Image (cartoon, rainbow, N blue to C red):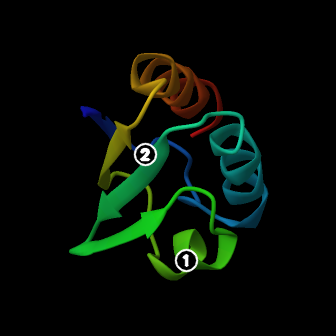
Amino acid sequence: MKAFDYVIKDEIGIHARPAGLLVKEAKKFESTITLKANGKSAAATKLMAIMSMGVKSGQTVTVEAEGADEEAASAGMQAFFEENL
């Protein structure tokens, strides 16, 4: 399993537009990708689960990738977070 922490810089947090893009990015990988924040966790491929986490600006999200392409999935998701959130 590969994991990294990321502090959300988007002033609105993880809202509908970036959450939709995040789901699309996560579906590119074979690995299971999970987001953890505020004591909650959600599959990165489930839009409503991500939205229900209520992640705000300044909060830390842990992203975990586990599976056949976890190295690529972790690197891809980290790049996505840095560019979009």
Is residue 12 depicted above or below 7 in this figure?
A: below
Q: Nearer the viewer, residue 23 or 32?
A: 32
Q: Residue at x 65, y 65 (%)?
A: 15
Q: Tell me the number on the disc at residue 33.
A: none
Q: Residue at x 44, y 76 (%)?
A: 53
Q: Residue at x 52, y 82 (%)?
A: 52
Q: Are marks 1 and 2 in contact (CB under 8 Å)?
A: no
Q: Quadrant of residue 25?
A: top right
Q: Position of residue 50 (x, y in %)?
A: 54, 69
Give the total number of marks visible in the rendering: 2
Q: Residue at x 57, y 59 (%)?
A: 14
Q: Tell me the number on the disc at residue 49.
A: 1
Q: Secondary structure at mark 2?
A: loop
Is residue 31 depicted above or below 49 in this figure?
A: above
Choose mark 1 or mark 2, whichever is in front.
Answer: 1
Is residue 3 depicted above or below 34 in this figure?
A: above
Relative to 4, 57 lies left or right? right
Residue bearing the label numbered 2: 8
Mark 1 Cα within 10 Å, few/some/many (few <14, many 20+)?
some
Q: Work out how far the residue at label 1 is from the one at label 2, CA to CA, in angstroms.
A: 17 Å
Q: Secondary structure at mark 1?
A: helix
Q: Position of residue 3 (x, y in %)?
A: 26, 34
Q: Nearer the viewer, residue 8 or 76?
A: 76
Which quarter of the figure is the C terminus placed in? top right
> N-terminal of the two: label 1 or label 2?
2
Say what amino acid the circle numbered 1 marks.
Answer: Ala
Say what amino acid the circle numbered 2 marks.
Answer: Ile
Q: Quadrant of residue 27?
A: top right
Q: Position of residue 34 (x, y in %)?
A: 40, 54
Q: Nearer the viewer, residue 60 or 77?
A: 77
Q: Residue furthest front?
A: 68
